[in-house]
Image (cartoon, helix red, strand yellow):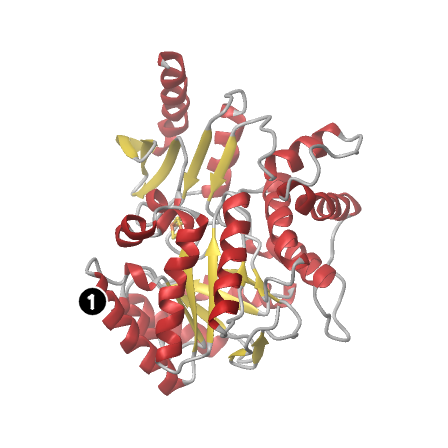
Amino acid sequence: MKTRTVHVGNVLIGSGHPIVVQTMCNTHTADVEATVAQCLRLVKAGSQLIRITVPSLSDVPALQEIRKRVPAEVPLVADIHFSAEVAMAVVPVVEKIRINPGNFHPNHEKARELFGELLEMCKQYDRAIRIGLNHGSLGKYIVEKYGNTPQAMALAAMEWVEMCIEADFYNVVVSLKASNTVVMVQAYRELARLMQEKGVVFPLHVGVTEAGNGDSGRIKSCVAISTLLSEGIGNTIRVSLTEPPENEIPVAQYLAQRYGPVMPGTDRASLSAREASILKAACDWGAPLLNHEIDDIPIEDEYLKDEIMQACRRRFYKPEYIACPGCGRTLYDLENTFNKVKERTGHFKDVVIAVMGCIVNGPGEMADADYGYVGEGFGKVTLYKGKEPVLRHIPENEAVDRLVELIDSSLRSE
Ligand code: SF4
């Protein structure tokens, strides 16, 4: 799909340029040493853009220091939640700002006003923005106005896209992530269609959010991202895994190299033979399954077949897990906890279980999870049933047991 070209520092996104591979730090931003060290590892691994969360104004000086110490040719993206003030404070510091403008203010008109101010600043400093809406965090105004569907996500994004066009600001990337691969693919297709209809097509940042880890996280990401890339939708990608972010890069490189033009001299994605065959199968079978062109996969490996079928939401053989990748807001050992939760809950049937790193965004981002484990900070956890926090301030060392009890007793009483 022909798009406009967006520049983020020296990196070009869209309109026939190679697909840009990116990831996000999971260090605490205030810990400058750890964040710079992780950025340098990510640059070495092949990340072309690096996103860093900026939870509050007090983190901006750390971001400034990080920007000075990471090679200038690797653009940094500030990840901002809720605060237009923080978004405006980082414009002079980094090359791109990721925001969901709808969350800037509970009053929608005020949110629009703040977004307009941000656009003016980005113009002045020649920055890029990403309008990033996620399925789980559309905001009350959007859900009331459009519902909570892929079409609603695309329409909600179009409101901000149109504001950018009206403001004559075109250095814009858009994303509509979801953990549910069917919702994610439909949302991006709809947004692509609406932008084409509008006559201004911004590049798309494509990813499955809260994909989890291990084979399941990789397969879930590959079936959905490959489906879109094979249709020419997607200009920059992130494979979100609940693992060290370095692990995301080879998977994203595999996808970028399989579907996009490759810069001369680019190294092949460094994958084990097993990993390469799993990714290939997910990419080969993802689109036909998601598009309901086939109902089964002619492969003998039953485990791989089960995983791909579940990633495409065609057959569920184990609980569906949602886990955020973690970021500077993460308040506990997310990866180990997620693995423990998977070990202890694998026997439950037909449930969606979420494990989220922070209480600020976790509950909203869990989307349609039946049960949620959300870090509160200070060694405490809140457990959710649906959207309700049913057990608060549970000590971390008891929380997995309590989650298992909660699921067990709920399922027995149904
Ligand atoms: Fe970071 Fe996870 Fe919180 Fe999202 S839910 S802001 S990835 S810790």
Relative placement, left or right, of 201 versus 389 is right
Closer to us: 154 or 313: 154
Residue at x 65%, y 53% (from the top left corner): 226
Helix, strand or loop status at disc 1: helix
Residue 20, picture quadrant:
bottom right
Identify the residue shown where x is 38% and y is 34%. Answer: 372
Farthest-out residue, bottom = 124
Give the image quarter of residue 97. Answer: bottom left
Disc 1 residue crowd, few under 14, some 14–19, many 20+, Cα 10 Å: few
Q: Position of residue 123 (x, y in %)?
A: 38, 84
**What type is the residue that disc 1 sits on?**
Lys
> Is residue 211 in sight in this rendering?
no
Q: Which residue is mark 1?
A: 110
In the rendered image, the vertical position of residue 57 relative to residue 411, given as above or below? below
Whether residue 43 is visible to the viewer of this picture, yes or no, is yes
Judge by depth and name the residue closer to the eye, 340 or 274: 274
Q: Position of residue 182 (x, y in %)?
A: 54, 44
